[in-house]
Structures are given as structure tokens and as C-alpha cells.
Amino acid sequence: MNNEFNKYYTSHDLKFDSLNDLVHHYMMKADGLASSLTVPIPKQANTPIAMNKEWEIKKSKITFFKCIHVGKFGETWKSDCKGKGPVTIKTNIATNITQETFLDEANILGKLHHKNIISLYGVCTESYPFYIVTEPMNGNLKGYLTTNNTTPAELVDITIQVTDGMKYLGEQDYIHCDLRAINILLGDHNTLKIANFHLAQHLNSNKYWTIEKGTKLAIRWTAPEGYALNRLSIKSDVWSFGILLWELATKGDLPYRGMTNKEAVELVSEGDHIFIPQDCPERFDQLMINCLKYYDDKRPNFKDIFDVLITYDTHDT
């Protein structure tokens, strides 16, 4: 509540100058509340933003089972959808602007059809919060890397699958803009699925995307042209793939560990790149170096990478 001194508080012991300050504080820690705050439920728009009605699924058909991820703007749940069986639900509880971006992701997924890209089953957009309904998943690649000892054969298979999906994405003139291990999901039968297309963009005739003000990028995976030129292309995704290779070689470690985001950006901006792990397989070593070339036109494309990877002897990697 707001008292006579224009302060906001839930307890007289702790007061804030603005409602935003109060909310931010209690998002960081509960500090006397039953639990910490998450994100605000948006004001109801007069007309929710809807996709093509063929994708619409009634919320009454959804049964939530287990929350598997909590993010800044929503949650991911293992669920069931009547008539479809097991599904993954991505929810969104944020501002109306973010709702539009949320549905942009669904619209993109609805146009993509590849065995290594997560499949859209439908959306729930008739009331807030919106849901994106996709095929069921079994965790992400980062979690897998940190809890399993991957063999050389597995590493090659992982890179081939990711590259195949990214090659297709580039052929459709899309860029992902957030390619990293945590956004590669595990499907059935050892199939990997590229997911989380919240930053994905359809490229213009110049084959690049000018980064919009306020866009939150994954700094440690972002190519140098993202900082220097404020734009990204499919070759920027190749750079991110180079960092993904580093994640594979280090069992899912955090890139540039020990550095702040600012220090990592300065390193990359000076023409350097992340260190190559000493025990990195030799051919992954060179592929990583090629993907992390400072100038994007010096990097290979995903077709070239795929063509090289499928020649690898998995017993010799």
C-alpha cells in the first residue's frame, strides 16, 4: 500500500519509493512473504493477439503435471493434451508487448518442419496467460552434458543433429539468435531438438537482422558483429555454434567462466575468442576455431560444417 509519505510497502519495516522497486525487491527474495514474487499478470487486452485458428487448443484440454523450468517471463511444464497425449507447455505471464513476441515464436515454429527442430502442436490464445504447446521433451542438452560422460561418438552425433537443424533453418532464411546447449532439448530415441525461438528472426533481403533496442541477448554466445555492428546473420549463429562446441568439450561449463559479461564482450571485441580446451578432440578444435573467426565472412556455413561432420570417424574423434 501507499502511505502518506508516498512510500510503498507490505510491511512497515521496509518501504520503497516506487511500486517497481517493491516488486523487484520481492522478486529477488521473499523477505517475509510466503514466497518470492515471479512476474506480473498482464492487464487484460480487449482482444488477445491470435494466431491462425487452426492452431488453437482449448485450455480445458490441458493437464499440467510438472514444472521443469521457471524463466523470467514464464514457465515450462510437462503436460498432457487431450487428443494429443504428452506435450510440453510453455506459458507466458508478462506484458502485452511480450505476449506479441511470445506469439511471434509460435508463428515461426508453425512454419518450420524438421526432425531436429521442436514441433509446434498448437497454442492457447483465447485468454491470458498464453500457452505454446509442443511435442514432449526430456530435458536439455546442458543438463545432459553435466550429468553424463559423453563418448566421442555421442559428441559427433550431437553436432551432426544440431548442424542439420541449423542448416535447414538457414535455408528457410531464419536465424535463431540464441543457440546454446540449454536451448537444445532431448527428444525420444536420442533425437535432439533446437528450441526456444523467442529471439528468432526472418532475415531481410540483406540477410541480416538489425538488433532492436532492448533486446536481451545471451552475451556469452553472441558474435562480435552483434556488439560492433548491432546486427546478426546466420553466420552469427555459426559463432554461437562454436561456443556450443566449447560447451560440448567442457561438459556444459559456462563460457568465459571467471569473467563478467563486460569482460567477455571486451575480449571478443578485441578480436580474441574463448580458449580452446586442452583435451578438446583435435578435429573439434579446428572446427571451433573456424566457427569463431572474428569476421563473419570467414566462418563456414552450416552446410559446410554438416558436410565435414558426417565424414568424421566417431572412433577417431
Image: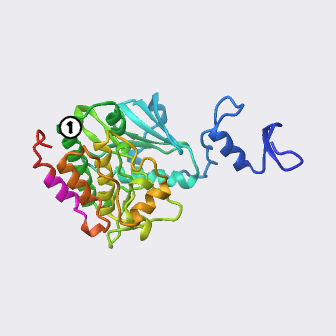
Residue identified by numbered label 1: 154
For image coordinates 25% across by 57% down, the residue present is: 289
Callout 1 crowding tier (Cα within 10 Å): few <14, some 14–19, many ≥20:
few
Horizontal and vertical percent position of residue 201: 38, 60
Residue 228, position as x, y percentages in the image: 42, 69
Compared across the picture, whether 25 is left or right of 1 comes to left
Note whether residue 216 is visible.
no
Q: Please give the count of numbered marks on the rendered protein.
A: 1
**Towards the viewer: 206 or 303:** 303
- Circle 1: element type: helix
Position of residue 52 measured from the top left corner of the image (x, y, whole percent): 41, 51
Q: How is the image coloured?
A: rainbow
Rendering coords of residue 112 (x, y %) = 30, 51
| Majority SS type along the magenta span | helix
- Left or right side of 144 for 217: right
Q: Quadrant of the C terminus?
A: top left
Foreground residue, 180 or 74?
Answer: 180
Task: Kindly identify the residue that appears in the image at 34 percent across and 64 percent down.
Answer: 233
**Residue 79 visible at all:** yes
- Name above or below for residue 64 compared with residue 193: above
Compared with residue 105, is residue 294 higher up or lower down, i.e. above or below? below
Q: Which residue is drawn at 39% across and 35% down?
A: 88
Q: Which amino acid does label 1 sit on?
A: Glu
| Vertical arrangement, residue 79 with respect to residue 246, above or below | above
Q: Classify residue 174 by image quadrant.
A: bottom left
* Nearer the observer, 12 or 317: 317
Instruction: Let me know if residue 42 is in the magenta part.
Output: no
Task: Residue at the far bottom: name it.
Answer: 206
Q: Give the range drawn in magenta.
A: 299-308
Q: Quadrant of the N terminus?
A: top right
